[in-house]
Amino acid sequence: MPPARAARQRPELVREAFRWSATRKVTRTATVPLEGNSYSVDPALVGRRVELRYELEELAKIEVFLGGKHAGVAPPFVTTRHTHRAVPQAARPAPAETGIDYLGLVVAAHEEEAGTGKIDFAVVMFNAEEDGEELSMSPLLPRALNNAATAALMAGAAAGMDLVDDACAKKAAAEITQD
């Protein structure tokens, strides 16, 4: 009988021809390891070397052979991999768009809580002498003057940078950097 005709009459021969096989020793707990998974086998096979026959795409169905004779099916005991590593994995689909910019919401909440790092000198409170020339900073500073902004102002003033335009703000910067 020609091989093509035999394959048409007995498709299980074709399937069997393309199956993979591996030889493993049965552990004393009646399991065999294969491709990162562990499979249960008949406890009568403990300590023996068995042949495992399987298809790459279906690691949940493993057949066990001892001396060329069928010795049962090995169901998965612990499954960590469902297909052989040689089988290309499908790409994960992109998550559905929700229309919500979560990162933008986090940034907005952070900026609202911490401020934007800019100092609004119009809201900084000062004590002015009666003639209006001598200005000193009030002990109460608004929350907008946070630690990061103060550190940036001090570093800029120490480097000789002209950070502000009006005299009131320049006086405040000078008082801050005196320490």
Image (tube, rainbow, N blue to C red):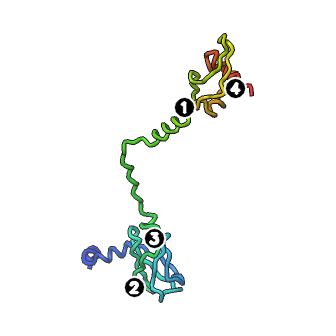
- Cα gap from disc 2 to disc 3, whole angstroms: 23 Å
User: Toward which corner of the image does residue 178 lie, by quadrant?
Assistant: top right
The residue that mark 4 highlights is 176
| Residue 78, x across and y down, in percent | 47, 73
In the rendered view, would you say 29 is above or below 97? Answer: below
Indicate the secondary structure of the residue bearing disc 2.
strand
Kindly report which numbered mark, 4 or 2, lies closer to the viewer in this rendering: 4
* Pick the front one: 61 or 113: 113
Q: Quadrant of the C terminus?
A: top right
Q: Position of residue 156 (x, y in %)?
A: 67, 25
Residue at (39%, 85%) from the top-left corner?
70
Q: CA distance from mark 3 to mark 1?
A: 51 Å
**First reached walking from the N terminus: tag 4 or tag 3:** 3
Where 96 falls versus 32 (above or below)? Answer: above
Q: Circles 3 and 1: CB distance less than 8 Å? A: no
Please, which residue is most extreme toward the bottom here? 44
Q: Calculate the distance from the C-alpha at mark 2 to the C-alpha at mark 1.
A: 73 Å
Q: Which residue is mark 3?
A: 79
In the image, 155 versus 16, the foreground residue is 155
Tell us which disc is closer to us: 3 or 1: 1
Q: What residue appears at the point 42 percent right and 79 percent down from the top-left corner?
A: 74
